[in-house]
Amino acid sequence: MKVKKVMYTKQGYSYIKCKREDCLDWGGLAKCDSCNEDMIDNVFLIYILGQAFCQECFEKWEQRAKRYTEDIKLQEENDERWYRAYGFKVS
Ligand SMILES: [Zn+2]
């Protein structure tokens, strides 16, 4: 299992930055869940959305996302397990 550092958006939402190859490893199609384009390089795996975005869509989402306290609470309880299901041990 790969060890990854969890990162946080300005709203406090966790995500993992990984690669196209990682998508294929977990059985994904390496397509962005937002724009449906092929992921070329960086892939952003976002717990609170339950989705994987390309860099462009990730940046757009971060710009417009709102912080909800109940989402952050849910995230604290569940995100490690969710990332683990994709093959990442988070630190
Ligand atoms: Zn996209």
Image: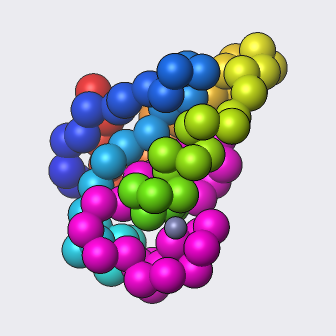
* Residue at figure coordinates x 53%, y 57% from the top left: 57
Q: Nearer the viewer, residue 22 or 12?
A: 12
**Image position of 69 with respect to 7: above or below:** above
Across and down, in percent, residue 10 comes to 52, 21
Residue under the image location 23 percent in, 74 percent down: 21
Instruction: Give the number of marks.
Output: 0
Asked whether 48 falls inside the magenta stretch, the response is yes
Q: Residue at x 78, y 21 (%)?
A: 68
Q: Main secondary structure of the magenta part?
A: loop
Q: Position of residue 37 (x, y in %)?
A: 49, 81
The image quadrant of residue 22 is: bottom left
Identified at 62% across, 28% down, the residue is 75
In the image, residue 41 lies in the stretch drawn in magenta:
yes
Q: Does residue 52 appear in this view?
A: yes
Residue 65, image x and y in percent?
69, 35
Magenta-tinted stretch: 28-51
Does residue 30 lie above or below 55 as drawn? below
Q: Residue furthest left?
A: 2
Mark yes or no: residue 76 visible: no
Name the residue nearer the viewer: 80 or 31: 31
Q: Height in image: 88 above or below 22?
A: above
Residue 64 in the image, given as x and y percentages of width and height: 69, 37
